[in-house]
Image (cartoon, rainbow, N blue to C red):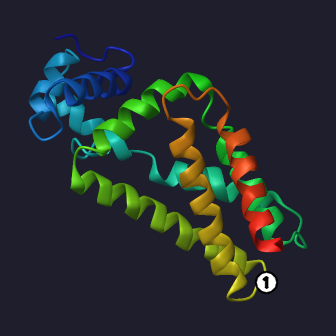
């Protein structure tokens, strides 16, 4: 095994995803992942705390996709517009070339209840963070919490549609459609 080969993290992730798909998450070991990537276990642990982190690495970066557009908005921006900007910002992180990885990741997560719980916890943490940001901007309760919940729900539904077989629209387009449907529901 060569030391210091470039792209170690990406190779580990690709190897892990293939093994998770082929033999299941629980039956795959870190040693197998490292060997498939032609790296050592030590190198694996330099990049990931455990094999779950292959699927969940980057939680802070994930939240920033949603929070950065809110931080950048003018101070008097209404809650609905903040959520719209947040969803648009997150949508830009998911171009078409990420769709196959996202589909594979969702398939793997769907096979293990512990991974499903972790995914739900990630979304719950995002709701909490968005609610905090909205309250910091002076949006009162219950509006701040409702807007945060709505934003994450719209994202989750949009993401599920985006990874569906045969779907060709962008995540941003789907999110706009879902957000418009939510607005129509509320105004009806």
Q: Position of residue 48 (x, y in %)?
A: 28, 41
The answer to whether residue 40 is seen in the rendering is no
Which residue is at the front of the view, 33 or 123? 123
The answer to whether residue 31 is seen in the rendering is yes
Q: Position of residue 24 (x, y in %)?
A: 16, 34
Q: Position of residue 7 (x, y in %)?
A: 39, 19
Q: Which residue is mark 1?
A: 138
Q: Position of residue 14 (x, y in %)?
A: 32, 22
Label 1: how many Cα within 10 Å (few below 14, some 14–19, many 20+): few
Task: Tell me which corner region of the image, top left, top right, bottom left or bottom right, holds residue 44.
Answer: top left
Task: Tell me which corner region of the image, top left, top right, bottom left or bottom right, holds residue 79.
Answer: bottom right
Which residue is at the front of the view, 147 or 1? 147
Q: For the image shown, how many numbered marks are present on the structure? A: 1
Q: Is residue 72 above or below residue 1?
A: below
Is residue 17 toward the left or the right of residue 42 in the image?
right
Q: Is residue 141 above or below residue 154?
A: below
Describe the element under mark 1 as helix, strand or loop. Answer: loop
Q: Is residue 147 above or below residue 5?
A: below
Residue that protrudes farthest toward the front in the picture? 188
Is residue 32 toward the left or the right of residue 114 in the image?
left
| Residue drawn at (72%, 80%) of the image | 136
Q: Is residue 13 above or below residue 180?
A: above
Looking at the rendering, in which quadrant would you find the N terminus?
top left
| Residue drawn at (80%, 64%) of the image | 184
Is residue 168 toward the left or the right of residue 83 in the image?
left
| Residue drawn at (19%, 23%) of the image | 22
Looking at the rendering, in which quadrant would you find the C terminus?
bottom right
């Amino acid at each position: 095994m060569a030391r210091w080969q470039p792209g170690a993290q990406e190779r580990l992730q690709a190897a892990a995803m293939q093994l998770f798909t082929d033999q299941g998450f629980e039956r795959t070991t870190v040693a197998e992942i490292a060997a498939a990537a032609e790296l050592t276990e030590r190198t694996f642990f330099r990049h990931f705390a455990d094999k779950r982190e292959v699927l969940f690495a980057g939680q802070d970066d994930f939240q920033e996709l949603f929070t950065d557009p809110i931080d950048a908005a003018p101070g008097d921006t209404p809650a609905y517009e903040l959520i719209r900007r947040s969803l648009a910002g997150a949508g830009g992180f998911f171009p078409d070339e990420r769709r196959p990885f996202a589909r594979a990741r969702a398939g793997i997560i769907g096979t293990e209840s512990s991974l499903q719980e972790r995914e739900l916890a990630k979304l719950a943490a995002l709701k909490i963070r968005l609610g905090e940001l909205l309250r910091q901007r002076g949006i009162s309760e219950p509006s701040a919490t409702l807007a945060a919940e709505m934003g994450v729900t719209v994202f989750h539904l949009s993401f599920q549609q985006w990874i569906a077989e045969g779907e060709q629209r962008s995540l941003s387009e789907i999110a706009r459609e879902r957000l418009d449907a939510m607005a129509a529901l509320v105004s009806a």
